[in-house]
Amino acid sequence: MSSHIKSILFAVVLSIVCGSLLTLASTGLREYQLRNIAFDKQKNILKSIGLIEDKKAPSLETVSGLYADHIKKMWIDFQGKLVPKEKKGENDLPVYLYVKQEKIQAYIIPVHSRGLWGKIAGYLAIKNDGTTISGFTVYSHQETPGLGGEIEKRWFQKNFADKKIMDDKGNFVSITIAKGAVQGRIPTSRHKNFVDGISGASMTGKFLSAGLKRTLIEYEPLSERFRKNEIK
């Protein structure tokens, strides 16, 4: 057998072996990957309502326990009515309810926004008054580290707490990321509707603001029901 044929056979066998090992690794790690995805999702939902903090890395058991005790996933229809999983329609939107002592304390909505370099995904929690933001988290993005990537940092996300999606006249205005600090740029009466932006990352703020507004408009029927005390 010539050396040329031997080289080809070696390459073929090596490819088959490597392919088989990759397939086995992917299959074997699938359950582990799915568990990590679910853990990260639950962790960010809990962070958005302040049940866990960034200072300590919570265990899988802690996150799973808090999630099971306090979070209930449901859906809403176009009228903002809560719909259980078994009755949800094709166009219904997911929502996560934070329940404590048998009362809804807040509701968490998934946020999917365009960013400067890719998609941004996170969770926005709103208190049961349908107006006040409880918290915000980002768990996936492709923004530039040190600039737009600051949206994943605690200093940025904590600025959302206690901001409002309604103005003084009761009109929906969403929440907007300012170009820099809110102080000195935005009228005092509107401070509650803005959060400090990231220096050098105004485009990331612009895209995320648009994504937040689009998401909040989709969930506005639900927020309105909370504002009217139609949901307890």
Image (tube, helix red, strand yellow):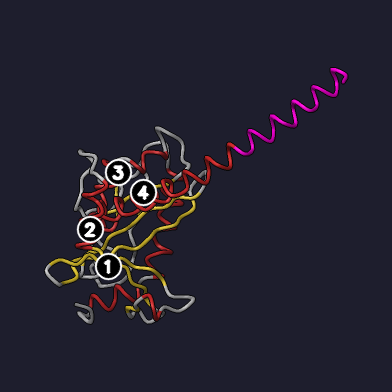
Q: Amino acid at mark 1?
A: Lys
The residue lying furthest to the top in this view is 3
Q: Is residue 38 above or below residue 24?
A: below
What residue sits 35% from the left and 42% below the top?
152
- Secondary-structure class at tag 4: strand
> CA separation, marks 3 and 1?
27 Å
Query: Can residue 145 be seen in this snapshot?
Result: yes
Along the viewing direction, whichever of 135 and 29 lies nearer the viewer:
29
- 110 with respect to 232 (left or right): right
Q: Residue 184 bears which disc, if any?
A: none
Q: Where's the C terminus, which quadrant?
A: bottom left
Q: Main secondary structure of the magenta part?
A: helix
> CA separation, marks 1 and 2?
17 Å
Earlier residue among tags 3 and 1: 1
**What is the x, y in percent for residue 155?**
26, 41
Earlier residue among tags 3 and 2: 2
> CA separation, marks 3 and 4?
10 Å
Q: Is residue 88 above or below residue 70?
A: below
Along the viewing direction, whichever of 166 and 46 lies nearer the viewer:
46
Q: Which residue is mark 4?
A: 138
**Dot 1 and dot 2 residues touching (CB under 8 Å):** no
Q: Which residues are magenta?
A: 1-20
**What is the x, y in percent for residue 47?**
25, 51
Q: Which residue is mark 3?
A: 156
Along the viewing direction, whichever of 17 and 50 lies nearer the viewer:
17
Q: Amino acid at mark 3?
A: Phe
